Image (cartoon, rainbow, N blue to C red):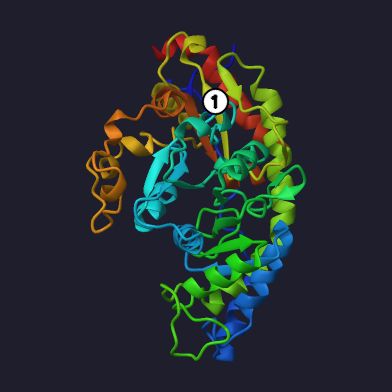
Amino acid sequence: MAGELALHGGSRVRNTPFPSWPVYGEAEEKALLDVLHSGKWGRLDGSQVAAFEQEFATYQGAQYGIAVVNGSVALWVALMAAGIQAGDEVIVPPYTFQATAVSVIEANAVPVFVDVHPDSYCLDPDLIEDAITERTRAIIPVHFAGQAADMDAILAIARKYELVVIEDAAHAHGARYKDQGLGAIGDMGAFSFQSSKNLTSGEGGIVLTNSDLYERLVRSVHNCGRLPEGEWYSHYIMGSNFRMTEFQGALLRAQMTRLEEQTRIRDANGLYLNAKLAEIPGILPFPRGQGETRHSYHLYMFRYNAAEFDGVPRERFLEALRAEGVPCSPGYGLPLYRQPLFEQLAFGPFTGYRQTVPNLDYSKVSCPVTERACREEAVWLTQPMLLGTQADMDDIVEAVAKVYAHRQELM
């Protein structure tokens, strides 16, 4: 049996930190200084953002990219381009960051929560049609943790009901579904470049699309409602200044030179962890082979089964695992519809739901898979950890196995 738990005074499995984030060097320093010295700091004056837009769009397999200030705005701009109106309904999963649903509220529309699939924590296509009403206009599948949602099934439903599909690909830089880049499969795709993301400039986002029409509309919305053929002070549609800075564009171009190798490393380490952790009772890695041909592993997740650990609660398991030197988290504590924002309908001036759903009540929503994930099942490891060596992955496995071996001491 492994030595005494570190939680109880034993030696830790790991005493060195995992890889840090972000990764940067001379390329990033030069990129920022070049912009500084150019005096062209804004997207309207310089060339860095425009170059990044095309490079990232090409990398993901899209025709167009429109860079914006963050991933939340990317979702909202896409919804505006899609023509979402007050009171329209948009199907979203409840296991995601609040921006997925808040962007719908900010479009004055109504988020309709549909549960996730237990094998992916992504939107469950089998449940979507039951949620569609005459007011449904769009679906936002989230490629959660970098795992591809079932896009074939989702797109088939969308075509049947003439719905717009906006991929929330905030976790999916470099990820592929049947060899197609995520974020370039639906009508539009929204990415984030926030500090924790696999491709980062501290903040920032982008909308990808293969549609000439959506490119025109997204670019207009993000640039104060202007159109290329119009005068500078002519504004044709509702929009504002959501343009990315040249500093961010230059930084992202430098970071792009690292992304492919980093994604390959994360994907290989994720597969390795899946194989090793699956050998430990009560640890259930998410299965591969559901269409994804590459997983970006913005998070490495597994499901924890307390029954196999003799009833040890997840929080106690996590406490023991952290003590062994493995940072970990339970992730979201509540489904989105259980957040006070939704239970209290604290939507500020965005009251479009009153036009079509006057008695909207999220307290009646129940998504069992999401509730189980939040309450007792999900375990998260962050993406920088997966940039480590195989020996680093072995430390994770050893620590989990050690906690399992001493599970009765945790009761």
Which residue lies at the image location 53% right of the left edge and 68% below the top edge?
218
Could you tell me the amino acid type at mark 1?
A: Pro
Question: As drawn, is 381 to the left or to the right of 395?
Answer: left
Which class describes the residues within 10 Å of circle 1: few (<14), some (14-19), or many (20+)? some
Q: In this view, does 196 lie above or below 337?
A: below
Left or right: 255, with 220 as reference point: right
Report x, y in % for residue 85.
39, 57
The relative height of residue 319 versus residue 354 in the rendered view (above or below) is above
Closest to the observer, 126 or 196? 126
Is 38 above or below relative to 11?
A: below
Residue 69 visible at all = yes
Q: Can residue 25 be seen in this view?
A: no
Question: Residue 234 sits in which quadrant?
Answer: bottom left
| Residue 98 locus on image (x, y percent) | 39, 47
Label 1 element class: loop
Q: Which quarter of the figure is the N terminus placed in?
A: top right
Relative height, residue 404 to residue 65 (above, below): above
- Residue with the most extreme right position: 179
Q: Nearer the viewer, residue 92 or 179?
A: 92
Q: In this view, does 40 lie to the left or right of 340?
A: right
Q: Name the residue under label 1.
A: 118
